Amino acid sequence: MREIAGGWRISTRPQHHDFIRKYLKSRPSAKLSLPALETLAVIAYKQPITSLEIAEIRGVNTSGVLSTLLERHLIKIVGRKNVVGRPFLYATTKEFLIRFGLKDLNDLPKIEDMAEALGFDPPAGLMEQSPREDVLPLTEEDFESGKVEKVEEVE
């Protein structure tokens, strides 16, 4: 048993690794592309964040990647930013914590430590801390419009 994402998960013993690996390789792959991983990292460290803010940090359009991450339940829409257009705000889900073996977001490595270990300077937008007073809660209209889907937390 291991504590992950505020709950418990049953894990296999190391001696069963080869058998489990063979079984998992026989299933279709659910790997994420490099752009999806980059986008997911930006969301994890800067949440809640809009797609425009993600695009500014990454330097590319992220709409297709966001759709993939939403479909895989790794991110969710958590509100709207209080600016013109009221864009959606994205954040990671409990499924994200489970898939990456994290108890909570405090278990994410420090950006500075990762950049130093990998030998590069992180994007400036990722290092800046921005206050989130501009976040609006979701309304029933958001759900009724079909643009936002209610996500129930998995226990």
Image (cartoon, grey):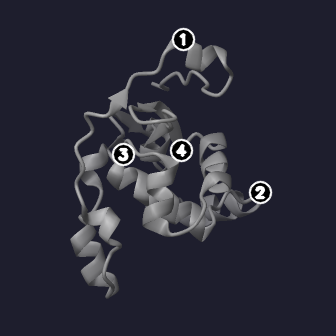
Q: Earlier in the sequence, mark 4 or mark 1?
A: 4
Where residue 122 sits, quadrant-wise, is bottom left
Cα separation, mark 2 vs mark 4, equals 18 Å
Disc 2 crowd, CA 10 A, few/some/many (<14, 14-19, 20+): few
Q: Earlier in the sequence, mark 2 or mark 3?
A: 2
Disc 1 crowd, CA 10 A, few/some/many (<14, 14-19, 20+): few
Q: Earlier in the sequence, mark 2 or mark 4?
A: 2
Cα separation, mark 2 vs mark 3, equals 30 Å
The disc at residue 74 is: 4
Comparing 132 with 40, the one in front is 132
Where residue 119 sits, quadrant-wise, is bottom left
Q: Amino acid at mark 4?
A: Leu
Q: Earlier in the sequence, mark 3 or mark 4?
A: 3
Which residue is located at x 29 percent, y 78 percent? 115
Q: Position of residue 73 (x, y in %)?
A: 58, 39
Which residue is located at x 24 percent, y 60 percent? 128
Residue picked out by circle 1: 140
Q: Earlier in the sequence, mark 1 or mark 2?
A: 2
Comparing 154 with 43, the one in front is 43
Q: Secondary structure at mark 2?
A: loop
Cα separation, mark 3 vs mark 4, equals 13 Å
Between disc 3 and disc 1, the foreground one is 1
The disc at residue 5 is: none
Residue picked out by circle 2: 28
Q: Secondary structure at mark 3?
A: loop
The disc at residue 47 is: 3
- Determine whether 46 is above or below 1 in the image: below
Q: Secondary structure at mark 1?
A: helix
